[in-house]
Amino acid sequence: MTVNSDIDDLNVIADEDTEVYGKVLEMLGANRVLVRCFDGEERTCRIPGRMRKKVWIREDDLVIVEPWDWQDEKGDIVHRYEQSQQDLLFDEDILE
């Protein structure tokens, strides 16, 4: 498998208009996490119900955050990358 096909297999790259990448700093409880987004903001994000028992989010995970329109310091987690996917995103300079 080539690196290019690995990138194609990721399938989830943040929409630059509405979503940002972020790193989980702290688990706050009640399905909430503190995320430092790559746009420089720290946001309190919630884990939606469709992800609660299916995707386990831990500190230092790379996630995609969709900030709320009406409250920019909060948002929803859209996706969590696995460690191998994180490494691939940094190796291919998609993330810096």
Image (cartoon, helix red, strand yellow):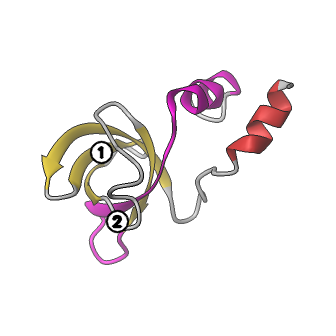
Nearer to me, 67 or 62: 62
Q: Residue furthest left?
A: 29
Quadrant in which the C terminus is drawn: top right
Q: Secondary structure at mark 2?
A: loop
Of circles 2 and 1, the one toward us is 2
Residue at point 32% right, 58% down? 52
Residue ID for mark 1: 35
Pick whichever of labels 2 and 1 is earlier in the sequence: 1
Give the image quarter of residue 59.
top left
Residue 5 in the magenta stretch? The answer is no
Q: How many marks?
A: 2
Q: Position of residue 94 (x, y in %)?
A: 65, 35
Amino acid type for the residue under numbered disc 1: Val
Q: Which residues are magenta?
A: 68-92
Residue 90 in the magenta stretch? The answer is yes
Relative to 8, is 74 on the left or the right? left
Residue at point 21% right, 57% down? 31
Badge number at residue 66: none
Amino acid type for the residue under numbered disc 2: Pro
Nearer to me, 74 or 12: 12
